[in-house]
Amino acid sequence: MNQPEATKLAESELPAGAIYWDALSSGEHRVRYRTPGGENFEFTGSE
């Protein structure tokens, strides 16, 4: 069973400076960050 993600925002909807952390069903986590300049970064990994 898949767990729902913490956020459903599209990359273009992330506010500048926002950081979102999602726990994935695989046991990994995903961190998304949008810089004040509008660049998006995404990191996926495990603890």
Image (cartoon, rainbow, N blue to C red):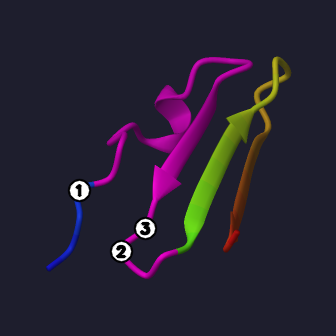
Tell me if residue 23 comes above or below residue 35 in the rendering: below
Above or below residue 20? Residue 36 is above
Which amino acid type is marked by label 3?
Answer: Leu
Q: Element at badge 1? A: loop
Residue 25 marker:
2
The label number, if any, that marks residue 42 in the structure image: none
Residue at the left extreme, as displayed: 1
Residue placed at 59% from the left, 59% from the top? 30
Which of the labelled discs sits on residue 4, or is there none? Answer: 1
Q: Residue 23: say if magenta.
A: yes
Quadrant where the N terminus lies?
bottom left
Asked if labels 3 and 2 touch by Cβ distance under 8 angstroms, the answer is: yes
Q: Is residue 27 left or right of residue 34?
A: left
The type of residue carrying mark 2 is Ser
**Observer-nearest residue: 10 or 45?**
45
**Could you give the CA–CA distance between mark 2 and mark 3, rounded to whole angstroms?**
4 Å
Asked whether the residues under the numbered discs 2 and 1 touch, taking CB atoms below 8 Å apart as contact, a structural biologist would say: no
First of labels 2, 1 by sequence position: 1
Q: Please report whichever mark, 1 or 3, sits nearer to the chain's N-terminal start.
A: 1
Dot 1: few (<14), some (14–19), or many (≥20) neighbours within 10 Å? few
Crowd band around label 3 with a 10 angstrom C-alpha radius: few (<14), some (14–19), many (20+) = some
Residue 43 image point, x, y percent? 73, 61
Residue type beneath disc 1 = Pro
Which residue is under mark 3? 24
Considering the numbered disc 3 on the image, is that residue within a helix, a strand or a loop?
loop
Crowding at dot 2, Cα within 10 Å, few <14 / some 14-19 / many 20+, comes out as: few
Residue numbers of the magenta segment: 5-27
Q: Position of residue 8 (x, y in %)?
A: 32, 42
Q: CA distance from mark 2 to mark 1?
A: 9 Å
